[in-house]
Image (spheres, rainbow, N blue to C red):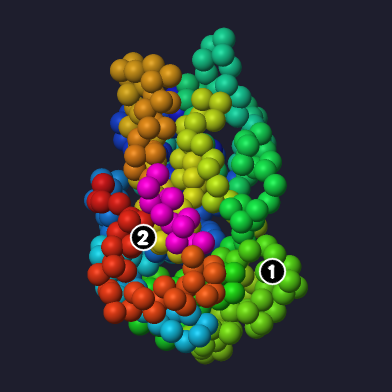
Amino acid sequence: MSYEVGIVGGGMAGLAAANLLASQGHSVVVFEKGHYPAHKVCGEYLSNESLPFLGKLGLDIESLGGQHIGRFAITHPSGKKLETPLPLGGYGISRYALDDAMANAALAKGAIVLQGVRAQSILHRPMTDDFEIQTDCGPFQFKSVVAAYGKRSKLDKPRGFATSTPDRKNNFVGIKYHLRSDIPDDLIELHLFEQGYAGISRVENGRTCFCYLTTAQMLQKAGSISQLEHRYLARNPYLAHHLSHSEHLYSHPLSISQVSFGDKGTVWQHSLMAGDSAGMITPLTGNGMSMALHGAQLAAYHLDRYLRGLTDRTRMETHHARDWRAAFGLRVQTARRLQGLLLNTHLSSLAISILRPLPGVARRLIRLTHGKPF
């Protein structure tokens, strides 16, 4: 079983790369350990910078029921609040709907999407300059590989960031569920609490995505998710309102641990990394979904050139790393600094007080963590 491109991970980045490469005539196989549709730990806000790209894939986000969002608000446990228009705006759309639509689009273009199949290892063979992906249903051979398996995977074990000592960059916990709430349709809210923040915004079908990030230390201190919300999140009066006046639509929240915002690298053992496997922007920016799509576009561009014989592997890898840094380096670094500031209760209170009479500065900070339409 030999193909041109193996894509490990069928999230937004993996499916976007599959759509592009299959439409260019390449034989593509996607390995996805789960099944579509499925919920993911994600803030589910898609910046409008991604709309031209989704159009190229043949996806109409309007048809999926996405919710237009044009305003942003941030609140503090003290009760302070800052609200501003979003420079680009975006859509609230669930991963449940979007990933499923992208998978169907990839299938329609001729990609093979293997659901419920886990990649166990990725091996580059220097003698033949190809790859073997070992899966729980046997081995597959490829000319090239895109590693798009997300925030954390067993495949990350050999990579440096995965073996580093837990610290303020790599020991976060993400928790998410859907609500029925009274949040305005066009508003995305960011609510601060001690050592964490929660994002709330509408998605399709009148649902609200409620997703928050905190440190593993805070969750351990609270003892459970319910106690974390009762003892710490509810100290923010706006969060207290949502927690007490909303209907929870999941029986249990989704969660992910050991979330890392440290440097990961865009190439590993000749696989091109895409999406969260290449690097994560802090969720407070609302730019993670767009970065996944844009990063996939970069990887697919360089792979297409390589497979057509227009470049060699070394140049492909060098140019992919260069273009990823150029597209995302500044916004990732800016977002890390903003997260460090907002996780400090005193500094975040001061920042909101300073920015409230300066909405133009607040919008400038938002622009620094986003890109241009692609």
Q: Which mark is residue 39?
A: none
Quadrant where the image shows the N terminus: top right
Q: Is any atom of residue 307 visible in this view?
A: no
Look at the image and say whether residue 259 sits in the magenta stretch.
no
Position of residue 217 in the picture relative to residue 373 (left or right): right
Secondary structure beneath dot 2 equals strand
Q: Is residue 141 above or below residue 70?
A: above
Q: Which of 230 and 302 is in front in this view?
A: 230
Q: Is residue 143 above or below residue 274?
A: above
Which of the pair 61/105 is nearer the observer?
61
* Residue position marked by numbered label 2 in the rendering: 46
Q: Which residue lies furthest to the top in this view?
A: 127
Seen at 47% across and 21% down, the residue is 143
Asked if the residue at tag 1 contacts the one at tag 2, i.e. Cβ–Cβ closer than 8 Å, the answer is no
- Residue 334 magenta: yes
Label 2 Cα neighbours within 10 Å, binned few <14 / some 14-19 / many ≥20: many
Q: Answer above or below: position of 248 versus 261.
A: below
Determine the residue positioned at 68% across, 51% down.
166
Where is residue 53? Give x, y as percent. 28, 48
Q: Position of residue 300 (x, y in %)?
A: 37, 34
Part of the protein shown in magenta: 329-340
Point out residue 218 in the picture as x, y percentages from the top left corner: 67, 69
Answer yes or no: is residue 343 visible: yes
- Disc 2 to disc 1, how far (Cα)? 28 Å
Q: Which of 119 and 197 is in front in this view?
A: 197
Q: Earlier in the sequence, mark 2 or mark 1?
A: 2
Q: Which amino acid does label 1 sit on?
A: Leu
Q: Residues within 10 Å of mark 1 (few under 14, many from 20)?
A: some
Question: At which x and y percent is residue 12?
Answer: 44, 49
Which disc, if any, is residue 219? 1
